[in-house]
Image: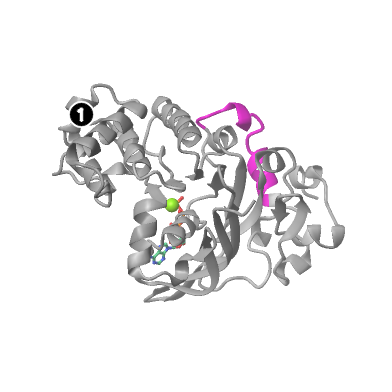
Amino acid sequence: SAPILDIRNLNLEFSTPRGRISAIRDVSIRIPENKIVGIVGESGSGKSTVVSAAMRLLANNALIPSGEVLFEGEDILKAGPKRLQELRGQKISMVFQDPMTSQNPVISIGQQMTDVLYRRRDLSYASKRDKVISMLRKVGISDPEIRFEQYPHEFSGGMRQRVSIAMALLVNPRLLIADEPTTALDVTMEAQIVHLIRKMKAEFEGSVVFVSHNLGLIAELCDEVVVMFAGEVVERGTVHDIFEQAKHPYTRKLLECDPALLNRRTRQLPTIPGSVPDLRTRPDGCVFAERCPVARPDCRIHHPKEIHTGEDHFARCLLLENGGDYTFADVLSPK
Ligand code: ATP
Ligand code: MG
């Protein structure tokens, strides 16, 4: 079926006093209907930039030289301000790492949540209030009538994140984007929030994009996975493709760092030794070549194409071109 969100060959730059930074290079991501897609990658790999482009919530210094961001077939990059407001208010919602950035400290939770429903002129205040209270109850907030009157500081971190999720889902969006929603929480809270996202996804029947450093959480929650490195998608596929059949040396390295990864929730993404390329002068060749244990000389010269390695499975590695492959052992014990 047609994807709900289809990012095609997106390039994005930030202009800075020290020149242009190529933050996103030729990124393609498909979010199918009714699926949870995880985006994983180390800090600075461009995860937030990509999802912000999908909401058109970009910093003023962002430039998009080329690419398309199709939401239900409509290019969001071409939408005017009014249309963007409509999309954000009705179709696409976002939950951030720190709920304090999306909740106003001086307005009660109930007021902020009923405000989200401002478009629903068909609803009286009393029925908006009912809707909000029932949504608060659904996300696991007890005594929602009392909570309705309270302010963000009266909620714990985990509860505030539940409120953010409730607020995001009030408009019944087609797509929920959660950018590291559990990073600020402890492990118990994190597990509860992940459980809640899964439960709510089943209920609202939309799609979810879940951004995380944590491969264990991604394995647990997601149907599909996108692996980013230095502003590029190096590999994408189903959870099975990525965790059992990884093709890209970077993905294989990540998994190798922790063989017990699938069973562990707390695991943060390990950093693989070596530096991330300077984004002001992108290398001609592969972005991972400097750190890649199986790189060949031509990996530093040719930028790899995205190779189709299975039904929904793609990887960007020169060694996979022309039907070539290398073994997992090559990555584990480089010659
Ligand atoms: P994290 O895991 O730390 O949240 P991320 O994967 O979300 O990282 P981004 O925040 O998308 O990474 O950043 C991608 C790159 O773009 C980084 O090099 C970052 O420094 C740069 N960047 C992001 N926003 C801007 C901006 N407004 N101006 C200049 N550079 C920016
Ligand atoms: Mg980020």
Does residue 171 lie above or below 279 as drawn? above
Examine the rendering and report whether any part of residue 240 can be seen.
yes
Does residue 313 lie above or below 304 as drawn? above
Does residue 304 lie above or below 267 as drawn? below
Which quarter of the picture shows residue 14?
bottom left
Between residue 253 and residue 171, name the one nearer to us: 171
The image position of residue 219, as x and y in percent, is 59, 35
Q: How many marks?
A: 1
Whether disc 1's CB lies below 8 Å from ligand 2 is answered no
Looking at the rendering, the stretch of residues picked out in magenta corresponds to 250-266
Between residue 70 and residue 260, name the one nearer to us: 70
Mark 1 lies on residue: 147
**220 drawn magenta:** no
Examine the rendering and report whether any part of residue 273 can be seen.
no
Q: Residue at x 72, y 45 (%)?
A: 246
Please state if 16 lies on the left or on the right of 294 as rendered.
Answer: left
**Rendered-image quarter of ligand 1:** bottom left
Question: What crowding class fits label 1: few (fewer than 14 Cα within 10 Å), some (14-19), or many (20 or more)?
Answer: some
Q: Residue at x 46, y 59 (%)?
A: 54
Q: In the orientation shown, which residue stands out farthest toward the top? A: 142
